[in-house]
Amino acid sequence: MPLYVTHLSIFLSHYNKKADMEKLKNEFDLWRSQSESRQKVTKTYFHYYRTKRSLEFLKQCNLHEAWNKLQKRKERIQTRRVIYRITSVAASLLLIGGLFFFEQNISNSNLLALTTQKKFNEMGSRKATLTLSNGKIVDLSVCQGEISDGKGITFIHNDAKKQLIYVRKAFKGIIQYNTLSVPRGGEYTLTLADGTSIWINADSQLRFPENFSGKREVELIGEAYFEVAKDAAHPFIVHTNKGSIEVLGTHFNVSAYMNDKFHVTLAEGKVRVYNEKEEVFLSPNQQVIMNSEENLKIKDVEAKFYTSWTTGIYEFRNTELSSIINQLSRWYNVDFSFEQEYLKQKSFTGVIFRNEPLSFATDILEKVSNVRFIRDRQQIRIENMKE
């Protein structure tokens, strides 16, 4: 195997690991910059790798059925060039642009990338409001830099990347709480005064103290991913309306939307999940789900499928369409309805990129799930695909 392929393979094999991302990218950029030939080879290999990954996902779907449907609709499908752009570390590592569908033309062995016309232009973005302890509401979409609590003490910084950072200050005996509210169609990241990092998903709210004393406790409605700063003397507790999660230092995802299933997924460390009826302990790649009787049930999962949204993608494996639609509805701030109830049970395996318009997701789902998305005023209707 050529040396350049070895370098590229090593880089790409680590693209979805958070650990040492920046260091790995810097080393790769240095290697690539040393000659023009390496830059050309890199571009070609990225194209190859992206195609390979797309085909791997397609193998998990009903490709034959999807392709037959594509053939019938081929005249209505426009062919366009795929624009590859790598704009940041995350973009480089995720190879932004998405999942494409390819036809093997037996006569000339060419691959034809097919996409459909965009029908839904909704996009998610980084936006949120912060409610301070004095009741002041700050729109973080427009307010950057230092934020004052109105008492002349500046301790909060909202940077250019729209990340909210709290600075530890001397505890004065009174715990003051702030609330970060993320609307439908938004997301935001937060660093608490103890160093804990939190990714907050659309249609979610987090109430937390400006500073900590003793136990570290926050309250969540909706979904968030936590990377808790280690502090053996002070447990970190997330309270929801359906149960609580206690940790010392770990990485986990909590989904506690009012009208959806409650589940906690552990990526690293160990957590205790409890409600008024019982408690359970999770190990990495385990998930606890609360059923209709409020019992906690543990199952083994791949945590990445429940935390991938924090890296800018939705990664699904045999996921029911109803669950996917709930996530798209919150992220794109759009209401959906199912024409037939049985469509909710259809399953999907693949990747959807959150930085793409809604049409990107609907086009993929139409091709592989045998459904059609139709705009109906302010709502999008989902119906069975008519051949």
Image (cartoon, rainbow, N blue to C red):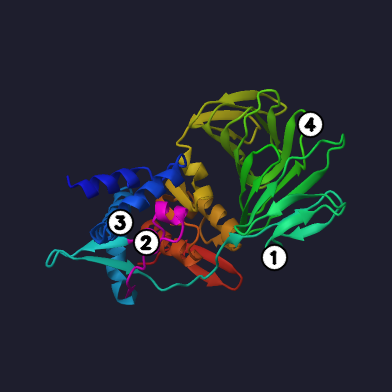
Comparing 202 with 152, the one in front is 152
Q: Is residue 215 left or right of residue 313?
A: right
Q: Is residue 243 left or right of residue 104?
A: right
Counting residues from the N terminus, which is met first, the one under dot 1 or under dot 2? 1
Position above or below: 379 against 33: below
Q: Looking at the picture, which amino acid does disc 2 mark?
A: Lys
Q: What residue appears at the point 53 percent right and 48 percent down from the top-left corner?
A: 310
Number of the front mark, 4 or 2? 4
Comparing 150 with 277, the one in front is 150
Q: CA distance from mark 4 to mark 3?
A: 49 Å
Residue ID for mark 4: 213
Q: What residue appears at the point 75 percent right and 29 percent down from the top-left corner?
A: 215
Q: Secondary structure at mark 3?
A: helix
Counting residues from the N terminus, which is met first, the one under dot 4 or under dot 2? 4
Residue ID for mark 1: 142
Identify the image quadrant of residue 225: top right
Q: CA distance from mark 1 to mark 4?
A: 31 Å
